[in-house]
Amino acid sequence: MSISRRLLLALSSLNLLGPLARPAKAARGTADVMLILAVDCSGSVTQQRYALQRQGYADAFRDARVQHAIMNLPGPSLHVAMFQWTGPDQQVVVIDWVIIDSYRDCQWLAEEIEAVPRQLHSGGTSISGAIEKAHAMLMEHQLPGARLVIDVSGDGANNRGARPEPSRDAAVADGITINGLPILFVEDGLEAHYRNSVIGGAGAFVIPVENDAQFADAIIRKLVAEIAGKSPASSPLLAQTLRG
């Protein structure tokens, strides 16, 4: 990295370059990682739990560990999109594809995520529908050489639409990795459901969340692993399950 780029990144991190501007909209070119954040907004997700998910992702993009992972991509070039999901055909894109490759971009994304209102409240829990939506978005915008990752968080097993395994397998066949962040507040056996029926692809993993206090750390670990293309570090608080 050149001295001038290092200086620009340092100034950006201190927010000395004026108001935050929207990062470049992702377009044809190249990318290191293309990451979709799929956030559960089904009826079992209380407003408090939705806010926990939203704030967790926002805080993660302000975290030095996540920023370090982004800045150390070869490009660096992380393309990110986020959607909310419930039923089989109920997904709403709340942040369309943007390029995140500076500290200012990370700060902008954190503020955007914090401002996203909840747009879905019911319709069941269709993880298969969420995977199919993310799969389609990645295929539509796929860039040469990019690692393709779907990040699914949720508090319930698939109970609407098709079973998730065929949707997962179709995505994996196209080179996509699906990782899971099951929130274990509501439903017994959810970690096993994510492990057996949701995650897949090279290096795929599950980081289960057992209580509110673990949530922020779990998202940070998950994003660092997804961006860097490595397995999450082991932790006595966060059991991990690897599949790949």
Image: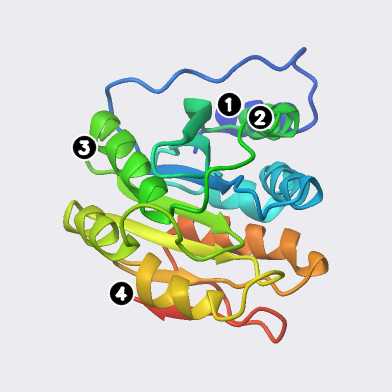
Q: Disc 2 marks which residue?
A: 7
First of labels 3, 4 by sequence position: 3
N-term-proximal mark, 3 vs 1: 1
Q: Position of residue 1 (x, y in %)?
A: 49, 38
Label 2 secondary element: helix
Return the residue nearer the eye: 202 or 91: 91
Q: Secondary structure at mark 4?
A: loop
Check disc 1 and report the residue beneath it: 4
User: Element under label 3?
Assistant: loop
Q: Nearer the viewer, residue 168 or 13?
A: 168
For disc 2, the neighbor class at 10 Å (few under 14, some 14 to 19, many from 20) is few
Check disc 1: other Cα within 10 Å, few if <14, some if 14-19, many if 20+.
few
Residue at the far bottom: name it: 236
Q: Height in image: 173 above or below 34? A: below
Mark 2 belongs to which amino acid?
Leu
Residue occupied by mark 3:
144
Given contact means CB atoms under 8 Å apart, are the residues at marks 2 and 1 in contact?
yes
Q: Are marks 4 and 1 in contact (CB under 8 Å)?
A: no
| Residue 53, percent from left and from top | 69, 50
Residue 171 appears left or right of 10 = left
Q: Residue at x 48, y 80 (%)?
A: 192
Residue labelled with disc 4: 244
Residue 54 falls in image quadrant = top right
Q: CA distance from mark 3 to mark 1?
A: 28 Å
Q: Earlier in the sequence, mark 2 or mark 4?
A: 2
Camera-side mark, 2 or 3: 3
Which element carries disc 1, helix, strand or loop? Answer: helix
For residue 93, above or below residue 130: above
N-term-proximal mark, 4 vs 1 = 1
Q: Quadrant of residue 205?
A: bottom left
